[in-house]
Amino acid sequence: MLKLRVTMTKGNYSYPLDPLWSTEEITTVLHFLSQVEKAYESKVDRDQLLQAYKAFKTVVPGKAPEKQLDKAFEEASGFSTYQAVKAAKAKDKGFVSLGK
């Protein structure tokens, strides 16, 4: 996996990206990771997070690669894609907030 360094409001960390992904696929993955960040830094609409996750799964359809990306992202940022999606699926509607 390629790591793209991006400056965030709460610090610098690298996004785990695959160099074989197209620009559109990278945009899809970054949008999903951005929704996860929102869930931790403030709140995110449950439906928007799940929609971003559905699009993400078209780029990363396998469970093993998804787990690898989640682990790399959590190590870099402290944010878990798994926990964010789990929290979104547990709600019927509204917002997801996983702030610490």
Image: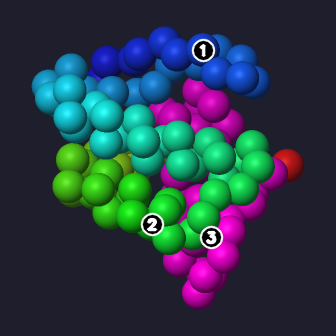
Residue at the spot of label 2: 50
Closer to the camera in the image, 22 or 17: 22
- Residue at image x 20%, y 34%? 24
Q: Against 65, is 54 above or below?
A: below
Residue 26 painted magenta: no
Is residue 83 visible to the viewer in this orientation of the structure? no
Residue at the spot of label 3: 87
What is the residue that sits farthest to the right in this orientation? Answer: 100
Closer to the camera in the image, 73 or 8: 8
What's under tag 1, amino acid-wise? Thr
Nearer mark to the viewer, of 2 and 3: 2
Magenta stretch, residue numbers: 72-99
Question: The N terminus lies in which quarter of the figure?
Answer: top left
Helix, strand or loop status at disc 2: helix
Closer to the camera in the image, 44 or 17: 44
- Residue 7 is tagged as 1
Q: Where does the image place residue 54, in percent across and percent down from the top left?
A: 32, 63
**Label 1 crowd bin: few (<14), some (14–19), many (20+), radius 10 Å:** few
- N-terminal label among 2 and 1: 1
**Label 3 crowd bin: few (<14), some (14–19), many (20+), radius 10 Å:** some
- Residue at image x 59%, y 27%? 76
What's under tag 3, amino acid-wise? Ala
- N-terminal label among 2 and 3: 2
Distance, label 3 to label 1, CA atoms, is: 26 Å
What's under tag 2, amino acid-wise? Leu
